[in-house]
Amino acid sequence: MSFEHVLPSKAAKAVRKLALSIVLLHLFCADALAGDAEPTSDTPSAQPTAPAPHVAFSGQAVAVNHVAPAELNKVLQPLGTSGGAVLEQPGGKSLMIVDTPENTRRLLEIKELIDIPAFAATRFDSYEAKSAAAEELSAAINELVRNGVIPTEPPQSVALAPLPVGNRVLVVSKTESALNVVRRWLERLDRRTGSPRRIYIYPLGTSDGAAMEKTLAAWTAAKKGNPSNPGGRPAIKVDTPTNSVILYATAEEFQEIKDIVNPSGRMAEFKQRLASIEKIFGPEANTSKSAP
């Protein structure tokens, strides 16, 4: 007797969809792992990539209102385009951003979110995740701080959020000592074991799966020809029943996919996280409040 005769029709359809997804995931993993194997002597070496096109930079002076310029610089400088810079200006009340117009706009948006009165006396750090995804590291450290596993003085004086550029974590702290403690924990949790790639599943939301599959195929093809790409190339499948992307990728590649699928999504999430952190660090906050 098939399960359709035992389960209601809606439940049977759900089971069939789940079974299809499991089979797809199984085939996908086998395919991806095979592609991640060490190349043999018969495998042609990757061809050098074409030189990057000329990038036009421009400079823009930015007034700093509340946070120390040196602290802002620690966040913005690592997010700049290669060849650009974020410079502290004489007098200590402004920064000079030298970057592409597009990335300058992104840096200015981040600057406006963190240069607020609630963070006037805080210390910042920008940690580049090497193995784990920034979102996972942020959630893990926040949970450890919330439960007192990571002791800070004063209690719960640190909060983390994934930055909307690259695979980086923003650390906001009331003291330099707490900042140092959290950095050691980040390095401890971010140790790579085995393959740099793992399986991620990311929902497509309202995006068209067929159109997105073509876009992601082009992105994968570009990765294939990059000799600096670790472990060869990522593998991607669009799962139609669940309208989601299943990918076998590094944490950094996963962040790139999220930007392709939902270009404004990470910035929107960052704004929400910063709003929660602001409540902890604002003048009305007290030590009984928990990290986000």
Image (cartoon, helix red, strand yellow):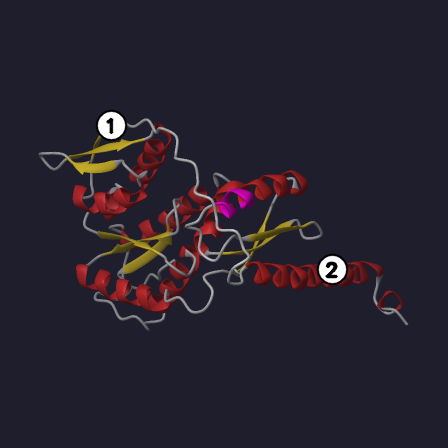
Specify the segment rendered in magenta. Answer: 220-225
Residue 141 spot, x, y in % from top left: 36, 64
Asked whether 222 falls inside the magenta stretch, the response is yes
Mark 2 residue crowding within 10 angstroms, few (<14) / some (14–19) / many (20+): some
Viewer-nearest residue: 14 or 39: 39
- Please identify the quarter of the rendering in which residue 3 is found: bottom right
Q: Is residue 159 magenta?
A: no
Residue at the spot 39% in from the left edge and 47% down from the top edge: 166
Which residue is found at the position 41% from the left and 50% from the top? 228
Q: Which label was assigned to residue 20? A: 2
Is 30 located above or below residue 217 in the figure? below
Residue pointed to by mark 1: 60
Please report whichever mark, 2 or 1, sits nearer to the chain's N-terminal start: 2
Instruction: Name the amino acid type tagged 2.
Output: Leu
Percent position of residue 15, x then y: 76, 63
Please count the marks in the image.
2
Of residues 136 and 235, the one drawn nearer to the viewer in this rendering: 235
Q: Residue furthest front?
A: 42
Residue contact at pointers 2 and 1, CB within 8 angstroms: no
Q: Quadrant of the N terminus?
A: bottom right
